Image (tube, rainbow, N blue to C red):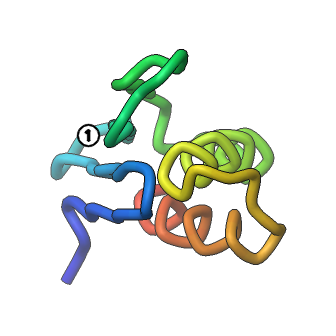
Amino acid sequence: MRAKRIELEGSAGHVAIERQRDSDTIRIDSILREPKKEQAWMTWEIPARTSDDDLFKIAETVQRRCDGVVGTNSMIHDYFREMQRFQD
């Protein structure tokens, strides 16, 4: 069994993380519920072999966009762990 797509929701927005079978890329779509000065939709297409450091940086942005606040390390790690499911 493998995860093909995961959707996560926070109080300020949600994110969809997916990787198609036999694909070498991970797609991450982040959508804000009520954008103010921030871009409502952000998309990353990254290699499945992206390093943990680079993936963690994306997780920081995704967590802030989903939860609406700068999160603690454990809050960011919740999103990071879900993203890691799609790495090679």
Residue at which label 1 appears: 23
Q: Relative to residue 82, is residue 80 drawn left or right?
A: right
Label 1 residue SS = loop
In this rendering, the answer to whether 78 lies above or below 76 is below
Q: Amino acid at mark 1?
A: Ser
Q: Position of residue 54 (x, y in %)?
A: 72, 39
The count of marks equals 1
Dot 1: few (<14), some (14–19), or many (≥20) neighbours within 10 Å?
few
Q: Residue at x 55, y 64 (%)?
A: 79
Quarter-wise, where is residue 81 in the image? bottom right
Q: Residue at x 43, y 62 (%)?
A: 11
In this rendering, the answer to whether 43 lies above or below 23 is above
Q: Residue furthest bottom?
A: 1
Quarter-wise, where is residue 40 in the image? top left
Q: Relative to residue 10, is residue 70 drawn left or right?
A: right
Q: Position of residue 9 (x, y in %)?
A: 35, 63
Q: Relative to residue 71, is residue 58 drawn left or right?
A: left
Q: Residue at x 26, y 40 (%)?
A: 23
Residue 27 at least partly seen: no
In this rendering, the answer to whether 59 lies above or below 82 is above
Residue 7 at least partly seen: yes
In this rendering, the answer to whether 39 lies above or below 47 is above
Of the pair 82 and 48, the residue shown nearer to us: 82
Of the pair 62 and 80, the residue shown nearer to us: 62
Q: Residue at x 60, y 74 (%)?
A: 78
Of the pair 15 and 51, the residue shown nearer to us: 15
Q: Position of residue 1 (x, y in %)?
A: 19, 83
